[in-house]
Image (cartoon, grey):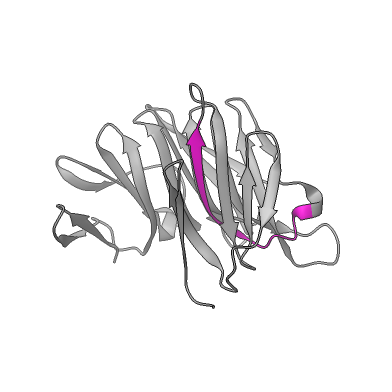
Amino acid sequence: GGTTLKGDGSAGRGERGGRDAGLWGGGGGGGGLVYAVGAGGTVLRRDDKGWRPLSTGAGEDHELNAVWGSGPGDVFVVGAQYPDQVGVVLHFNGQSWARTALPARQLNAVFGTGPSDVLVAGRAPAEEGGGMNGIILRWDGGRWKRLLPRERENMLPQLGIWAGRGGGESMAQAWIVGQNSQLARFDGKSFGFRTPGTTAAIEALWGDGEAWFAVSSGGD
């Protein structure tokens, strides 16, 4: 079953998540709440009383990979529904969960700067030649828009996102990482691309506006 680790500044201790399922992603939802997501449509929330499973409407055929929230009434969870391999977003508005299917086979990452500016990323079928390409979509508070330029969708499945806020809740910058040691920077309007000097698939990252840190599972 899934296990989480809680640190107190000097050490960490394991906590059972309250459900016998693998956990793939975790994150804060504001208001002191923490979420964990994973196999079988699992969404767990931790408050001052501990972990408890949430009923989102996602069945056991859902694999959920990442979670991000701007507050207790605005939480996004991403993943895929199998065996059809449909990328899905679950959104909690403080009262109920809603599920949206997007034109992707799988969504691996989510990050935003507010309820009306959120990025999700993953993989989608290539338009030509078969295989899979990367896909990035942006939520503007009303609809999802495909964001990654078509000519750069050869960036393979996107695995991690970090975004920084500008004025208000607008997105000043975002970094997206994935396979092929690809790195994309989005300045809120357009993309720039670079190779960070490793052959590894970059799987996750975090930043603070001045610097960012990325991790990989191998490579040079």
Q: Position of residue 195 (x, y in %)?
A: 64, 62
Q: 201 or 132: nearer the eye?
A: 201
Outermost residue on the top side: it is 168
Q: Is residue 157 magenta?
A: yes
Question: Up-down: is 77 above or below 131?
Answer: above
Is residue 43 at least partly visible in the picture? no
Residue 133 lies in quadrant: bottom right
Q: Position of residue 126 (x, y in %)?
A: 78, 60
Q: Is residue 34 left or right of residue 100?
A: left
Residue 55 lies in quadrant: top left
Is residue 41 at least partly visible in the picture? yes
Q: Is residue 30 left or right of residue 186?
A: left
Q: 146 or 148: nearer the eye?
A: 148
- Please tell me how many numbered marks the rendered image carries: 0
Q: Which residues are magenta?
A: 152-165
Outermost residue on the front side: it is 210
Question: Up-down: is 64 above or below 114?
Answer: below
Q: Position of residue 118 (x, y in %)?
A: 54, 36
Residue drawn at (68%, 53%) of the image: 193
Q: Position of residue 3 (x, y in %)?
A: 26, 63
Q: Is residue 83 magenta?
A: no
Q: Is residue 61 left or right of residue 126?
A: left
In the picture, the quarter occupied by the C terminus is bottom right
Q: Is residue 100 left or right of residue 50?
A: right
Residue drawn at (81%, 67%) of the image: 130
Residue drawn at (61%, 66%) of the image: 181
Question: Up-down: is 219 above or below 8?
Answer: below
Question: Up-down: is 98 above or below 3?
Answer: above
In the picture, the quarter occupied by the N terminus is bottom left
Residue drawn at (57%, 57%) of the image: 177
